[in-house]
């Protein structure tokens, strides 16, 4: 403890062993020890006594669309990482699409790393992309340090990131399984989507009908079949349909290496509440009914759903037209995800330990970030529901470590 630069003390520190009174020491941006509450503080260290404010580990958001470079009028690393820090997120992993170029080759990855290096206020990592024509790029991207590969099973919404049909999915997944990589998947069946009613216009009910649960369920079933055949690691992105939960539970019981995420908007907003013409609520797959939401929460509590991530996907306001068919689909949630999830989790009887498990421990595990997660030595510094002073480097070489000054921390929040 003698080399500690910062000492954080709270009567409620969330640790791997549970919530307890503790003193947390930080040196060179890394937690060095979690000590008894009354541990002596070195004279050279700065003490922050937080009283009974809860001290949380930094959150890890593995599903963020930063759009930088190429569409920085939508978002860039400078603003995205500041929003994340203000929301208690100390690590994000950027999706491979909506930026130009997409992260589908090592050269494109290097471009994105260079752009992020001088703009990031927190740790940033990158997913690669799996496209119809880049199977030969997957292993080099893995070796260059991406955390895994994203694929769409239906059109992505941007021309430069084409979706995979089942044959091309099999080719990409075979390649990825060969080096035990991870494929993360936007799972909606394009045939089910094409067969659904497509009215367009401002009515949310019409938009919801155009993205039926069956489209998710069918795509997830096909993904499970491929993963089982190849013994591959797969992850379902932004699960919205509760009807897919029995498929997921059964696959995992059979040993399929499958993980699943959902998002704050599916857990806190309902279709019944979305006003007509309010395309700021548009995302794909869509926000569904309250009864569906209840089942997502149940699956999260039971462990069928592993984690909660934002799927932060901003755009300029002019793209959010009143026509749900043509409006950009994406919800911005980096700064608000923690308070949104915690508010609803608390109402449903869950504790902050559950929220940390869903938004830090399991997301860090998904990306293989061994130095992230619950407050313990070598982890990212903790903070009272707000960002740390300085993040630590990640273990993957495709990460960019923050170099700029972080924004002013948000006020501490409390939990009873």
Image (cartoon, grey):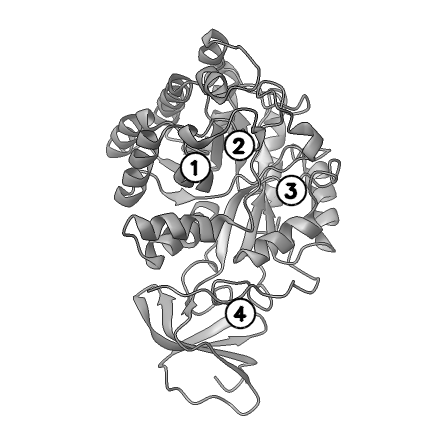
Identify the disc placed on residue 30: 4
Which of the marked residues, 3 or 4, is nearer the chain's N terminus? 4
Give how far apart the Cα atoms at labels 3 and 1 are.
23 Å
Residue under circle 2? 281
Examine the rendering and report whether any part of residue 5 can be seen: yes
Given this view, does label 2 or label 3 mark the residue nearer the observer?
2
> Which quadrant does the C terminus fall into?
bottom left
Residue plotted at (57% across, 64% down)? 392
Given this view, does label 3 or label 4 mark the residue nearer the observer?
3
Which of the marked residues, 2 or 1, is nearer the chain's N terminus? 1
Given this view, does label 2 or label 4 mark the residue nearer the observer?
2
Q: Is 153 drawn above or below residue 74 in the view shown? A: above
Mark 3 residue crowding within 10 angstroms, few (<14) / some (14–19) / many (20+)? many
Residue under circle 1? 269
The one nearer the camera, 191 or 103, is: 191
Given this view, does label 3 or label 1 mark the residue nearer the observer?
1
Residue 74 % position (x, y): 70, 38
Give how far apart the Cα atoms at labels 3 and 4 are.
26 Å
Left or right position of 75 against 351: right
Residue under circle 3? 66
Residue 85 % position (x, y): 58, 57
Q: Is 325 drawn above or below residue 52 in the view shown? A: above
Left or right position of 356 against 276: left
For label 2, the SS is helix
For label 4, the SS is strand
Give how far apart the Cα atoms at labels 4 and 1 are.
36 Å
Residue 206 % position (x, y): 48, 16
Residue plotted at (34% across, 58% down)? 353
């Amino acid at each position: 403890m003698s080399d500690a630069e910062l000492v954080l003390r709270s009567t409620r520190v969330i640790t791997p062993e549970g919530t307890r009174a503790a003193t947390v020491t930080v040196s060179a941006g890394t937690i060095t020890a979690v000590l008894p509450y009354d541990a002596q503080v070195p004279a050279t260290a700065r003490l922050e006594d937080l009283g009974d404010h809860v001290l949380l580990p930094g959150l890890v958001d593995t599903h963020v669309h930063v759009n930088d470079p190429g569409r920085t009028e939508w978002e860039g690393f400078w603003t995205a990482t500041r929003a994340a820090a203000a929301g208690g997120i100390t690590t994000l992993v950027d999706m491979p699409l909506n930026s130009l170029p997409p992260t589908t080759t090592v050269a494109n990855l290097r471009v994105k790393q260079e752009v992020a290096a001088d703009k990031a206020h927190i740790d940033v990592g990158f997913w690669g992309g799996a496209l119809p024509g880049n199977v030969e790029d997957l292993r080099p991207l893995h070796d260059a340090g991406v955390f895994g590969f994203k694929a769409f099973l239906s059109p992505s919404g941007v021309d430069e990131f084409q979706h995979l049909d089942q044959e091309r999915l099999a080719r990409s997944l075979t390649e990825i399984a060969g080096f035990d990589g991870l494929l993360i998947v936007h799972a909606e069946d394009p045939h089910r989507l094409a067969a659904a009613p497509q009215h367009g216009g401002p009515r949310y009910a019409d938009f919801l009908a155009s993205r039926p649960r069956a489209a998710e369920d069918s795509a997830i079933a096909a993904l499970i079949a491929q993963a089982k055949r190849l013994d591959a690691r797969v992850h379902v992105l932004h699960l919205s349909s509760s009807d897919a939960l029995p498929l997921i539970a059964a696959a995992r019981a059979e040993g399929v290496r499958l993980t699943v995420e959902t998002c704050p908007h599916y857990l806190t907003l309902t279709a019944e509440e979305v006003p007509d013409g309010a395309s700021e609520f548009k995302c794909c797959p869509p926000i569904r009914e309250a009864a569906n939401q209840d089942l997502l929460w149940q699956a999260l509590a039971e462990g069928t759903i592993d984690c909660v991530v934002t799927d932060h996907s901003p755009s300029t306001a002019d793209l959010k037209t009143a026509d749900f068919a043509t409006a950009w689909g994406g919800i911005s949630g980096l700064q608000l995800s923690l308070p949104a999830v915690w508010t609803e989790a608390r109402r449903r009887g869950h504790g902050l330990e559950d929220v940390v498990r869903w938004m830090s421990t399991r997301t860090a595990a998904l990306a293989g970030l061994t130095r992230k997660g619950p407050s313990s030595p070598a982890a990212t510094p903790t903070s009272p529901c707000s960002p740390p002073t300085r993040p630590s480097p990640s273990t993957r070489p495709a990460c960019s470590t923050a170099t700029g000054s972080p924004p002013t921390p948000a006020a501490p929040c409390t939990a009873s």
